[in-house]
Image (cartoon, rainbow, N blue to C red):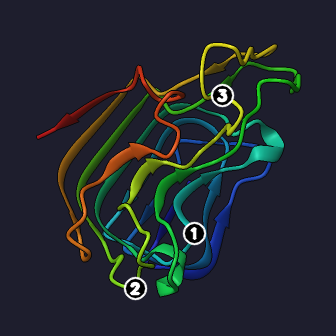
């Protein structure tokens, strides 16, 4: 599936999509909502939403494959004050969706500018991942249906208007084993 030179409020894949590409486009307040597999590529686009890509929690926040994000501008919350996360979703590990749920195995981000200039005073900087599971803060939380988490994030030339560095997540425990490589 290819969206090229589109201006729209959202890309929203409900029942799953494979190998989707969004390029030369502008997405509004609902941004990119997806579940599926293969490679999700977002290139030369501006996304004005709460997250750059949101994994739909009603389908297990699942993407079995990878994300490639190149030459994009992300305006968190459409420019309103708030926090900023690139990849959003929610997964408690307590619900059986009928299939294994995955985060993208690999996330490649090149030449991304995050326009977080209108941030609140308590803002700590943008995060790669939102807090997918606020209950998972140590080893005591057990997922009955384990979530297969991202293995690797590769960042090249990621800049912020605020000057604050990109961090892994508000939930550092959940993403403690994710390898982040800055090139």
**103, 124: nearer the viewer:** 124
What residue is shown with label 1? 50
Checking the image for residue 109, the label placed there is none
- Residue 180: x and y in percent read 28, 32
Q: Of the residues under marks 2 and 3, which one precedes in the sequence?
A: 2
Q: Residues within 10 Å of mark 3 (few under 14, many from 20)?
A: some
Question: Which is more foreground, mark 1 or mark 2?
Answer: 2
Q: Of the residues under marks 1 and 2, which one precedes in the sequence?
A: 1
Q: Is residue 82 above or below residue 17?
A: below
What residue is shown with label 2? 118
Q: Quadrant of the C terminus?
A: top left
Q: Secondary structure at mark 1?
A: loop
**78, 133: nearer the viewer:** 133
Q: Of the residues under marks 3 and 1, which one precedes in the sequence?
A: 1
Residue at left 57%, top 69%? 50
Left or right placement of residue 154 versus residue 131 in this view: left
Residue at left 47%, top 73%? 76
Q: Secondary structure at mark 3?
A: loop
What residue is shown with label 3? 136
- Residue 64: x and y in percent read 58, 28
């Amino acid at each position: 599936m290819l969206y090229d030179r589109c201006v729209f409020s959202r890309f929203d894949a409900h029942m799953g999509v494979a190998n989707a590409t969004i390029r030369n486009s502008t997405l509004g307040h609902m941004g990119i909502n997806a579940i599926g597999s293969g490679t999700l590529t977002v290139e030369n686009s501006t996304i004005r939403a709460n997250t750059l890509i949101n994994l739909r929690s009603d389908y297990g926040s699942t993407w079995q494959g990878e994300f490639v994000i190149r030459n994009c501008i992300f305006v968190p919350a459409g420019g309103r004050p708030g926090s900023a996360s690139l990849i959003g979703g929610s997964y408690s590990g307590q619900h059986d969706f009928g299939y294994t749920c995955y985060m993208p195995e690999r996330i490649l981000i090149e030449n991304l500018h995050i326009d977080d200039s209108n941030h609140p005073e308590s803002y700590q900087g943008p995060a790669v991942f939102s807090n997918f599971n606020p209950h998972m803060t140590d080893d005591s939380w057990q997922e009955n249906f384990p979530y297969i988490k991202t293995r690797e994030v590769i960042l090249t030339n990621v800049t912020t208007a605020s000057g604050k560095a990109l961090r892994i997540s508000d939930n550092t425990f959940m993403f403690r084993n994710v390898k982040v490589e800055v090139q």
